[in-house]
């Protein structure tokens, strides 16, 4: 064989030069200062959540696919086209989490949390995945900070979730926050409203986009969230969900708004707000930062709602009333107003806050805010009304001190500070409470 033929043979065997692998579209490496900004935001959010009585939970990044398809529901963008799914060698159908709530509800039952004092207040943080079009502050792998309250139907839970989220965002640097809020009703009022909605859209079906016509069959509420210009125009005169609320639904929504008024949280009622997931009921909301958007468009940096009927769709024997929300951490960290927070050390609460009656509860979140600003975290059980039950929970928590805030104290602007060891207690003016507590051992 000649040298020429040998060289030709060697050239044929030569493998093509490989190109260095690139990150998947919509997914990023986070390092250097950005890494610490994410960590700093998480620690700040964790700290604020802890002050308000939330505890941590971390769920798997992968779950059974049925958990999401049952919980989120057909006719939603997440299920129809955004979820990452896979089949294992053993034949299991799994999905990478597109959101947290269904996992939290699954863990609530699997870990026996229903036997704990209710409500169970949890926070979580981590990446979620959706095959969406990458855009400003939105990626296919993105990070959320989540707040959940499970086990109470009371309106104070809705208010506490919103207040905690707003406090987190303000601590992170948000300057102009407004809450878009709506109520989409309960089991009694939802069918009535959906019927009105369907009848309305049938009159305009010729002007609906193809995807919205399909939603009319599978999930009519999602049409209210349509981004199609023609549908947006039609939605301006769509039926109002609030007008269809049951008496219980109206009372619940009214109380939520009263709490927001009491806490001076700016809000506006948005009748077309439904959020993108099927499990929502009663209160739904979005948090907007009006100074940090592009082209003068407010930037949505968080949102959530009540999901009282999720548990049964996942296979539970009974419903569990619950409320939750998620903050889009990437949008916060990339915003011009973000404070560029850095990681720091946390504190463990030593105060248990007991509230008795609606008047006290109405003012209680302002007391918590006062303590938070003084760096005094608390634990609390917002769905309990009796003193005995709350003292028993405080005893089990191991908190050395309890604050007792009832109707009389709310009127007098005082609070009772109780030493859980020797049972001694003292009445303190709210103006001096933080100073008094800081002196306790």
Image (cartoon, helix red, strand yellow):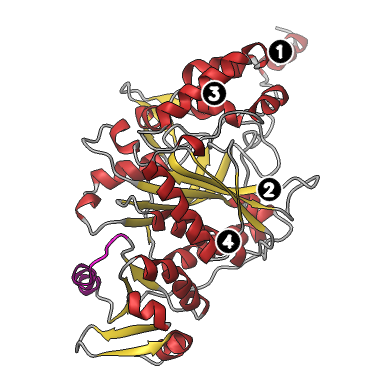
The span from disc 1 to disc 3 (Cα, nearest Å) is: 53 Å
Q: Which residue is mark 3?
A: 81
Residue 441 lies, in percent from the top left, at 34, 90
Q: Which mark is residue 270?
A: none
Circles 4 and 3: CB atoms closer than 8 Å: no
Which of label 4 and label 3 is nearer to you? Answer: 4
Q: Which residue is mark 2?
A: 299
Q: Is residue 34 above or below residue 253?
A: below
Query: Range of the magenta residues?
Result: 383-397
Q: Which mark is residue 265?
A: 4
Residue at image point 69% right, 12% down: 9
N-terminal of the two: label 1 or label 4? 1
Residue 175 lies, in percent from the top left, at 69, 63
User: In this image, 386 relative to 432: left or right?
Assistant: left
Circle 3 crowding by C-alpha within 10 Å: few under 14, some 14–19, many from 20: few
User: In this image, 334 relative to 154: left or right?
Assistant: right
For the N terminus, the quadrant is top right
């Amino acid at each position: 064989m000649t040298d020429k033929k040998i060289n030709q043979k060697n050239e044929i065997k030569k493998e093509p030069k490989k190109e260095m692998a690139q990150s998947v579209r919509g997914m990023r490496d986070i390092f250097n200062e950005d890494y610490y900004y994410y960590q700093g935001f998480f620690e700040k959010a964790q700290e604020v959540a802890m002050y308000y009585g939330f505890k941590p939970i971390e769920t798997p990044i992968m779950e059974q696919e049925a958990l999401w398809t049952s919980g989120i529901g057909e006719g939603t963008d997440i299920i129809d086209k955004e979820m990452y799914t896979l089949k294992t060698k053993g034949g299991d159908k799994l999905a990478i989490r597109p959101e947290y709530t269904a996992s939290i509800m699954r863990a609530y039952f699997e870990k026996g949390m229903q036997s704990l004092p209710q409500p169970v207040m949890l926070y979580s943080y981590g990446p979620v995945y959706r095959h969406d079009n990458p855009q400003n502050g939105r990626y296919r792998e993105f990070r959320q900070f989540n707040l959940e309250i499970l086990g109470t139907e009371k309106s104070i839970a809705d208010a506490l979730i919103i207040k905690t989220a707003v406090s987190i965002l303000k601590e992170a640097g948000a300057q102009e926050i407004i809450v878009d809020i709506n109520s989409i009703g309960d089991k009694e009022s939802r069918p009535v409203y959906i019927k009105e909605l369907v009848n309305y859209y049938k009159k305009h079906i010729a002007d609906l986009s193809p995807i919205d016509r399909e939603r009319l069959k599978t999930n009519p509420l999602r049409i209210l969230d349509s981004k199609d210009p023609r549908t947006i125009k039609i939605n301006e005169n769509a039926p109002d969900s609030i007008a269809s609320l049951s008496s219980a639904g109206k009372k619940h929504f009214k109380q939520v708004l009263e709490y927001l008024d009491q806490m001076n949280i700016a809000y506006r009622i948005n009748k077309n707000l439904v959020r993108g997931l099927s499990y929502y009921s009663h209160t739904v909301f979005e948090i907007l930062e009006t100074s940090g958007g592009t082209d003068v468009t407010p930037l949505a940096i968080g949102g959530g709602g009540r999901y009282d009927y999720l548990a049964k769709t996942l296979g539970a024997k009974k419903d569990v009333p619950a409320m939750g929300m998620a903050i889009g951490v990437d949008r916060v960290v990339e915003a011009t107003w973000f404070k560029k927070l850095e990681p720091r050390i946390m504190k463990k609460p030593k105060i248990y806050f007991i509230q008795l009656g609606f008047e006290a509860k109405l003012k209680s979140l302002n007391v918590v805010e006062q303590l938070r600003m003084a760096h005094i975290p608390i634990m609390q059980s917002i769905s309990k009304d009796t003193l005995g039950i709350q003292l028993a929970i405080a005893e089990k928590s191991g908190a050395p001190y309890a604050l007792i805030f009832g109707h009389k104290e709310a009127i007098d602007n005082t609070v009772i500070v109780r030493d859980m060891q020797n049972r001694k207690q003292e009445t303190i003016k709210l103006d001096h409470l933080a100073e008094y507590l800081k002196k306790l051992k």
